[in-house]
Image (spheres, helix red, strand yellow):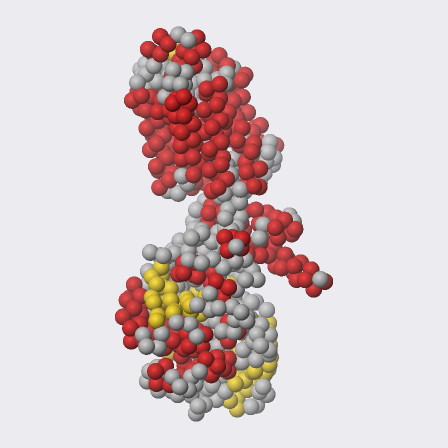
Amino acid sequence: MKTFRIGGVHPAENKLSAAEPIKQAELPKVAVFPLSQHIGAPAKPIVQKGDKVKVGTMIAEAGGFVSAPIFSSVSGTVLKLDTVVDASGYAKPAIYITVEGDEWEESIDRSSDLVTLKDRREELTPEVIKEKIKNAGIVGMGGACFPTHVKLSPPPGSKPEWIIINAVECEPYLTADHRLMLEHADEILVGVTLLMKAMNVGKAYIGIENNKPDAIELMRSKTMKFIHDGDIEIVPLKVKYPQGGEKQLIDAVVGRQVPAPPALPVSVGAILQNVGTAYAVYEAVMKNKPLFERIVTVTGKSLAHPSNFLVRMGTPMSQLIDACGGMPEDTGKIIGGGPMMGKALLNAEVPICKGSSGVLLMNQEEARRSEPQPCIRCAKCVGACPMGLEPYLLSKLAENHDWERAEKEDVVSCIECGSCSFTCPSHRPLLDEIRLGKQTVLGIIHARKAKA
Amino acid sequence: MNKLVVSLSPHVHSGDSVSKNMYGVLIALIPALLCSFYYFGLGAIVVTAVSVASCVFFEWAINKYLLKNPQNTVCDGSAILTGVLLAFNVPSNLPLWIVILGALFAIGVVKMTFGGLGCNLFNPALAGRAFLLISFPVQMTTWPLPGQGFMTYMDATTGATPLALFKQAIKSGDTSVLNDMPSAIDMLLGNTGGCMGEVCELAILIGLVYMLARKIITWHIPVSILLTVFCFGGLLYLINPTTFINPMLEMVSGGLLLGAVFMATDYVTSPMSKKGQIVYGVAIGFLTVVIRTWGAYPEGMSFAILIMNAFVPLINNYFKPKRFGEVTKKK
């Protein structure tokens, strides 16, 4: 069975909510929409206090090419333009909307009928598909939130050969993508054919780790149905973290390694999209539905009922936690995302955004880090690093502020997957130091380029 | 509500720890330890106990009184490990004060002077052995013969190790001494003279399998050492079987296996990258055969490892792991 070639670790999977069907989360009383829900320029608000909005009304337009518009997920009145503490831990500009009823824009097709590419082949040219994706505010749903239309506009001269769909979900605990595949396989596959058409490629791969045999089975049984719209192959992958990393997944599926930055995946012929993104593309193109809701896993060992929800964006996480039986007494940490790469949150009022794949509650025992001990040079971090770097060395160089040497040792190639800190028997905060080194070196490189 | 912890990712840990690894190696040493007790009786037990106790004591005392280190590393098992390995590297009839002196050198000079756990350049147990071998050459090379009953210690009958016999035969040209050579099976099982821990090769192999299975070490260092010794020794044997030792015999004799499995694989003093580990292993194998064949001592393993310990920083500098996407970068 395929997997990526360098490094990797095996965290305990803890997929507590894998068997829980997706439930519709209740509407919030007030929905909060941060303007920075994606990589790139923040969106610009186009509503004012007191404006009436419907579900699917655009409330902020894209702030540039690398940006994405934001749509209201609720109907009601704009309460205020203020700030909210988001997953980054900082207060960021946001639009607050008081919820009144649930009235949708008429343009959205709310039926559950499956529309395939075959039905609308003439109308949907690559340009039309890309335009619809851009106008629906779709960003990468895996967590990085890179605007999808930018990914679908590779630099001139590059030759995309395949679409690779990331359905790996290698983060422990998270089951949102897994449930999505089980419950919306057809829609995902149509979404993939749309992406193939948009990029004019003949082949797509869907990489799924083999801890989800039911999803592999189901998706595989359905690919033939869409063979006239595109050749889709399901690729089962051996479970290993961080297989969902962009570069690792390309290596695992097609055996090519993307060179160090600034090279893009398309330089080896691959366009990567998350499985949730493929679903969002289907809804945007075929149902005219902009991105305003997503699947979120709410989980944790002490939580009474770990669940998967279909959540309107802007819903505070605390409401989802209440729907799972309430915040456990012993909660010591709230994480937006999975335990390997997710962000620890300041409070439970952080709203669900485009990139929120999960809410994970850790008890006080789990939340604490162990005391670091001296490095015993066991080289386990070197063996675990999926980028072939030397975490022990990079963290030491960052500690010593030796930026020049850190740059030479390729610190900027770090993907911040956390495998080094996870594996370190001395519990050293390797990634903390490496992040500092990476950010500083990136700044130095940037300044050098600006001068030249 | 409780105060929330806000820290950077990752938020989970493998659960591995320094002491788990150290105690893992100690578990892997149990078969060899039992064998040495079986063959050398009371002497082996006394020497091991004293060596471990003095290593732990010196580590604790230096941490507490000299370094005033609030985080005392004495509980992590590394000092116990050094103690057992030091005992494994000396004859079982060694006077106790020499054992204690060896422990003081290993822990005090080789380990703690450089900053303690993780900072030492040389393998403490091996450096301790080298120190003793140079300071007390007579006591360190009178080997008790195995199987003399449980109560033997200082009064044990002594004899030469197989490697010493071979060296003597080659030097003097008198091959009659080779009649005293134990059979290869005896050497594999440990029924020969030698250091406590090195005699039973089978027990060491069991330890190797255990450590590989628990992923405490990887195969790179032991396999590259053993293959190099076999190939290089075999080449010499093919050139002239009368002056060079049979490589099969070479493999099961002396401290080769003990060194390859437990000494050269010491985390702190071995290279970080897989490539570096193979270079390190090949160099150790090569140096061992060179010292055994042409050097003054019959045994070359410990010096080969110590020499290569000194090269580890250089190896780390020149042998980097293969970076992701490196192949494509060069095209």
- How many marks on residues? 0
Q: Nearer the viewer, residue A173 or A117?
A: A117
Q: Is residue B331 above or below residue B48?
A: below
Give above or below for A170 relative to A46: above
Q: Nearer the viewer, residue A414 or B18?
A: A414
- Left or right: residue A17 compared with residue A151: left
Residue B143 % position (x, y): 41, 15
Residue A282 visible to an observer of this rendering: yes
Residue B249 image position (x, y, % from top left): 36, 22
Q: Is residue A72 above or below residue A347?
A: below
State the residue at coordinates (41%, 25%): B235
Residue in front for this viewpoint, A204 or A190: A204
Looking at the image, residue B200 sits to the left or right of residue A41; the answer is left
Is residue A36 visible in this depiction of the protein? no
Quadrant in the picture for residue A3: bottom left
Q: Nearer the viewer, residue A385 or B31?
A: A385
Q: Quadrant of residue A323?
A: bottom left
Question: What residue is rendered at 58% in x and 57% in y?
Answer: A412
Q: Residue at x 57, y 87 (%)?
A: A47
Task: Please state the horizontal and vertical placement of residue A272, each as a whole percent of the image.
Answer: 45, 68
Residue placed furthest toward the right: A451
Residue A132 drawn at (x, y percent): 47, 82
Left or right of residue B152, residue B22 in this image: right
The residue drawn where x is 68% and y is 62% is: A449
